[in-house]
Amino acid sequence: MLTQNVDKQTPLHDEHLRLSAQMMSFGGWTMPLKYSGILDEYEHARHGVTVFDTSHMGEFIIEGDARTIGLERIVTQPLSTMPVKSCRYGLMLNAQGGVKDDLVVYRLAVNRWMLVVNAGTTESDAFHIQECLADRGAFQNVSDEILKLDVQGPRSRDVLRAIIPGIEKLDYYTFDEFCALGQNMIVSRTGYTGELGYEIYGPADGVRPCWERLLDGGAKPAGLGVRDVLRIEMGYPLYGHEISETMSLLEAGLGKFVDWDKDFIGKEAVGAEKARGACRKSVMILSDSRRAPRAGHAVWAEDGREIGVLTSGTFSPFFKKGVGLALVQTEYNQAGQKVAFGEKTNPSAAAIVRRPVYQQGSLKH
């Protein structure tokens, strides 16, 4: 008898239904796409404060010295030099240099780490990491035990510190442990929107009341729809679009997240690509009109030659134009280059622009 795969639900699933969220399937989870509408949620994220349920993300705990246990080789960024209570963005590669996932590493203690990975790759990431560690017993998948909230927007600090005093002391890409509403939680000053923001990790019975208090304090719930708009305006990659096992980090423009002085899985392949030069580059494009680029659209040069493909695209509420990310032939990756996208018989004019195209955010405030 065939069994049908059923999407997982976060501990806040009934809350999303109560708030009349439009739900969607994403990464093996049923997640809110939108509540009041993407444009409305965008305004709150850019000018007020929003809260996202991101409990679909995966979390792993690893015990041990990063070098001795083998964790250092798994991530492209240096880990042993990280201060305790700091976070670092990096990538996990396969032996061919393709990106298995992008992730954020939290140094909880000298020899204790938390890795936050993407929802759709959680199981494959867990297998890969355990295979690469010197001691499988050092690894623990705690994804099902953690409820995660992202509080984002220029007013996020003011709204959140009314519930969790002391978060105003956090610097960008640092975290601490707090006792809030009777529960211990990890709060980091991180996010995926280009705005001032925080991410909260804790048990469902502690974070759920935090969700309710945030809404009472003026935060608006937001879904994956506006999250995609916000991250595209910032030029942030999304796994399966700008990065994948068949795409290199150099093509994605993520070479700055590599420490070439350390050993890591895939280094030989990526180093060889670096020496010869990547054939393709990820670029941002801004449409001349309101027409939004879409993933899969072809990208054309001024002379009509097909030079690449859109990996992500949306309508930018800030610019009132379409904005997207594309993978194009390297010789066409210069800002100011005129391009077009869509069908060759009816292309839309656009230009390559420097990323991020949105530079008015409160990220480092």
Image (tube, rainbow, N blue to C red):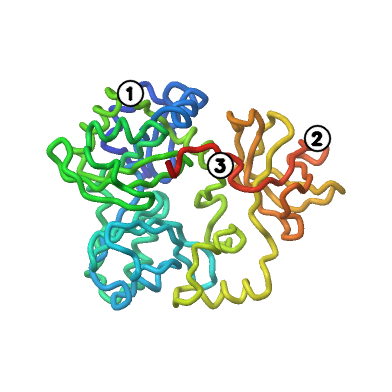
Which of pointers 1 and 3 lies earlier in the amino acid sequence? Answer: 1
Up-down relation of residue 279 to residue 356 (above or below): below
Q: How many marks are shown on the rendered structure?
A: 3
Which one is closest to the eye, mark 2 or mark 1?
Answer: 1
- Residue that numbered label 1 is attached to: 218
In the image, 29: left or right of 251?
Answer: left
Residue 259 horizontal side relative to residue 350, left or right: left
Between the residue at mark 2 and the residue at mark 1, the CA separation in whole angstroms equals: 45 Å
Position of residue 74 measured from the top left corner of the image (x, y, whole percent): 40, 69
Q: Nearer the viewer, mark 1 or mark 3?
A: 1
Q: Secondary structure at mark 3?
A: helix
Q: CA distance from mark 3 to mark 2?
A: 24 Å
Give the structural element (helix, strand or loop) at label 2: loop
Within 10 Å of the Cα at label 3, are there few (<14), some (14-19), or many (20+) other Cα atoms? many
Residue on which the image places disc 3: 232
- Residue located beneath label 2 in the image: 346
Q: Residue at x 33, y 43 (%)?
A: 199
Label 3 or label 2, whichever comes before in sequence order: 3
Q: Residue at x 44, y 64 (%)?
A: 92
